[in-house]
């Protein structure tokens, strides 16, 4: 759960909550592991942005439009952005790097990030816990925890793909319209 929360986030925590609902893990352990993994990854990315701002990876990330968008939000709403970035699709990993590039103190980031990660971990563990019950009601009594885990991961993957599709289409909207107007007679 700790590594899953670091790597991907929500899908693993939702799956952990669903498995907790089945009695395989105590819910507090799922939430604690999710919290720890989330905070650890955010702090690593923040420090990476702060200490390695001239490294080629950070320079490459800095050139991306999504990082520029994140920096704009950080400059306008620093506290609110630190509290909210983990809920914004597509900005989860790049945001701590962007915040590390700013003058926001490491202590301020740590405090706000810790608060946000605690709420996030509890929320997604609870959603997974409740979704586990709903999945069981929809599909009947699931006999195997691995089947439940697979169902939750598939649902998480599908929802992530759908969100990615709509966000990509929204970001490409003006560019696509320009390309289509050039090719149409």
Image (cartoon, grey):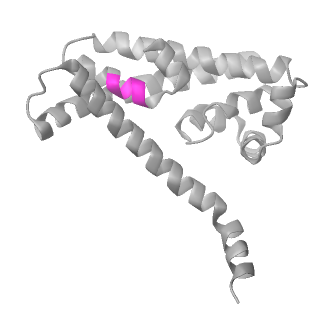
168 or 94: which is nearer to us?
Answer: 168
Question: Any magenta on residue 166?
Answer: no
Secondary structure character of the magenta stretch overall: helix
Q: Is residue 174 left or right of residue 87?
A: right
Residue found at the very far right of the displayed protein: 54
Instruction: Name which residue lies at 8% across and 28% down.
Output: 141
Instruction: For residue 184, say whether it is visible.
Output: yes
Q: Is residue 67 left or right of residue 40?
A: right
Instruction: Name which residue lies at 41% across and 24% down.
Output: 12
Instruction: Name which residue lies at 41% across and 30% down.
Output: 11
Q: How many marks?
A: 0
Query: What is the quadrant of residue 126 in the picture?
Result: top left
Give the residues in magenta.
11-15
Instruction: For residue 102, say whether it is visible.
Output: no
Q: Residue 139 at x, y = what percent?
A: 13, 37
Query: What is the quadrant of residue 25 in the picture?
Result: top left
In the displayed structure, would residue 156 be above or below residue 22? below
Q: Residue 54 at x, y = what percent?
A: 91, 25
Q: Residue 129 at x, y = what percent?
A: 26, 26
Q: Quadrant of the C terminus?
A: bottom right
């Amino acid at each position: 759960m700790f590594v899953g929360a670091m790597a991907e986030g929500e899908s693993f925590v939702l799956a952990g909550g669903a498995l907790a609902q089945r009695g395989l893990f105590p819910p507090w352990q799922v939430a604690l592991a999710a919290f720890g993994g989330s905070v650890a990854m955010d702090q690593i990315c923040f420090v990476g942005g702060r200490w390695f701002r001239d490294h080629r990876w950070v320079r490459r990330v800095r050139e991306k439009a999504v990082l520029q968008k994140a920096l704009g939000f950080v400059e306008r709403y620093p506290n609110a952005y630190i509290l909210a970035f983990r809920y914004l699709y597509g900005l989860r990993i790049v945001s701590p790097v962007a915040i590390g590039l700013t003058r926001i103190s490491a202590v301020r980031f740590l405090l706000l990030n810790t608060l946000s990660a605690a709420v996030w971990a509890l929320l997604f563990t609870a959603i997974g816990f409740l979704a586990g019950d709903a999945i069981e009601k929809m599909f009947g009594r699931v006999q195997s925890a691995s089947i439940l885990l697979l169902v939750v991961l598939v649902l998480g993957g599908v929802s992530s793909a759908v969100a990615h599709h709509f966000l990509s289409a929204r970001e490409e909207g003006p560019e696509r319209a320009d390309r289509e107007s050039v090719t149409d007679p």
